[in-house]
Amino acid sequence: MSLFGLGSRNQKTFRPKKSAPSGSKGAQLQKHIDATLGSGNLREAVRLPPGEDINEWLAVNTVDFFNQVNILFGTLTEFCTPVNCPTMSAGPKYEYRWADGVNIKKPIEVSAPKYVEYLMDWIEVQLDEESIFPQKLGAPFPSNFIDVVKTIFKRLFRVYAHIYHSHFQKIVSLKEEAHLNTCFKHFVLFTCEFRLIDKGELAPLQDLVESILQPK
C-alpha cells in the first residue's frame, strides 16, 4: 500500500486520480518514487535519481503531488464549503484570488472550494496538454516547462496553506493529521530541492516549513 494511501472510508477524491506520463519513463520513475517513499526517507525520495532527466522527474512528481492534494481535499469537501470558507484564505493576512490568464484574466475573489475547483481544472488541462507534459518517449519538453511546474506548485501550496489554517482541527478529528503532515513534508522537501516556490509565497506556513527544512 502506498505511504500516502488513506483508509477506505476516505477514498473519496476531489476528482479522479491522474496517472503518471505513460509514454515517457513515467511508470519507471513512479516505481522509483514508491520504492524510496516506502523506505520512509523523504529527503532521499525527492532527489533526482542518477542519470535521469530532470524534466521527466518534475513531470512525474507534479502528477503525484496533484493526486496527493486531490485526495487530501477530497476528505474536506463537506466541511470546506462556500458558507464556511467564502474566500480562499490562509489565516487573516493571506487571501488568494483566481486567474488563469485565459478564461479569467483579471483575478477574482471566489470561495475556497471554488478556487480549488478552478485550480484542479487548470492543472488537469496542463497535465493533459501533450505539448507541455509529453506522453511519448523522447518527446521534448517545452522551453517554459519549469515555469509551468513552478506555477502549479505555487498554487498547490495555497491549498495546503488553506487546509492548515482553516481545517486543521477537522483533520485532527478525522485522525488524518499524520497523513497531512507527511504529505506536506514531502511537498516542501521537493519544492525546496528544485527551488520551485519563492520564499515569500511560503510565508503563510513559514514556521512549519522551517521546522521541516531544519537538518535532522
Image (spheres, rainbow, N blue to C red):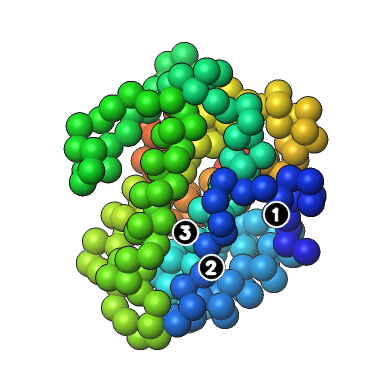
Q: Which residue is mark 1?
A: 4
- Using the image as rendered, state which of residue 182 and residue 51 is in the foreground: 182
In the displayed structure, does residue 132 sit left or right of residue 213?
left
**Mark 1 and mark 3: Cα distance apart in space:** 15 Å
Measuring from the top left, give residue 67's x and y in whole percent.
56, 55
Q: Which residue is mark 3?
A: 62
**Mark 1 and mark 2: Cα distance apart in space:** 15 Å
Q: Is residue 95 above or below residue 102?
A: above
- Using the rendered image of the protein, determine whether residue 216 is visible from the camera's viewpoint: no
Measuring from the top left, give residue 8's x and y in whole percent.
79, 51
- Using the image as rendered, state which of residue 130 and residue 56 is in the foreground: 130
Q: Which residue is mark 2?
A: 19
Q: Are the residues tagged 2 and 3 within 8 Å (C-beta)?
A: no
Q: Secondary structure at mark 1?
A: loop
- Using the rendered image of the protein, determine whether residue 45 is visible from the camera's viewpoint: yes
First reached walking from the N terminus: tag 2 or tag 3 = 2
Q: Secondary structure at mark 3?
A: helix
Q: In percent of the image, x 40 and y 49: which residue is there? A: 121
Q: In percent of the image, x 44 and y 81: which residue is there? A: 24
Q: Is residue 20 above or below residue 67?
A: below
Crowd around label 3: few <14 · some 14–19 · many ≥20 (10 Å)? many
Q: Are the residues tagged 1 and 2 within 8 Å (C-beta)?
A: no
**Mark 2 and mark 3: Cα distance apart in space:** 11 Å
Q: In percent of the image, x 43 and y 21: which residue is there? A: 87
Q: In percent of the image, x 40 and y 77: which residue is there? A: 135
First reached walking from the N terminus: tag 1 or tag 3 = 1
Q: Quadrant of residue 64?
A: bottom right
- Using the image as rendered, state which of residue 155 and residue 120 is in the foreground: 120
